[in-house]
Image (tube, rainbow, N blue to C red):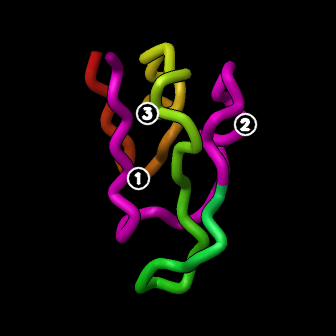
């Protein structure tokens, strides 16, 4: 099963990953990281396609996708 990992402490909340996810399973958290940004998180890991669109779009290398 694919696994997506977010380094929440590095996320700046740009939402680029949210906009490119074909399954729409990436959302912005209600909580904030230490930098004061809402960070990206995944709602249902089992629906992930491991397409890595999110990881390629992230300007801060916050996302890792394992197939």
**Element at badge 3?**
helix
Q: Which of marks 2 and 1 is nearer the N terminus?
A: 2
- In the rendered view, tell whether residue 62 sits above or below residue 55: below
In the image, is 3 to the left or to the right of 42? left
Alpha carbon of mark 2 to alpha carbon of mark 3: how far?
12 Å
- Residue shown at 68%/20% (left/top)? 22
Q: Which of marks 2 and 3 is nearer the N terminus?
A: 2
Residue 59 percent location from the top left of the image: 47, 47
Location of residue 28 by image quarter: bottom right
Alpha carbon of mark 1 to alpha carbon of mark 3: how far?
9 Å
Alpha carbon of mark 2 to alpha carbon of mark 1: how far?
16 Å
The magenta-colored residue range is 1-27
Instruction: From the image, tell me which residue sits under label 1.
Output: 60
Within 10 Å of disc 3 (Cα), the crowding (few <14, some 14-19, many 20+) is many
Residue 29 percent location from the top left of the image: 61, 64
Residue 45 percent location from the top left of the image: 46, 32
- In the rendered view, tell whether residue 35 sits above or below residue 53: below
Q: Contact (CB < 8 A) between labels 1 and 3?
A: no
Location of residue 26 by image quarter: top right
Instruction: From the image, tell me which residue sits under label 3.
Output: 55
- Residue shown at 52%/32% (left/top)? 54
For the residue pair 39 and 45, the one nearer the viewer reads as 45
Residue 10 percent location from the top left of the image: 37, 65
Within 10 Å of disc 1 (Cα), the crowding (few <14, some 14-19, many 20+) is few
């Amino acid at each position: 099963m694919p696994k997506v990992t977010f380094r929440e402490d590095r996320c700046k909340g740009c939402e680029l990953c949210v906009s490119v996810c074909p399954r729409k399973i990436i959302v912005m958290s209600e909580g904030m990281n230490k930098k004061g940004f809402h960070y990206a998180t995944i709602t249902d890991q089992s629906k992930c396609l491991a397409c890595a669109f999110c990881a390629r779009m992230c300007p801060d290398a916050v996302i890792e996708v394992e197939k």
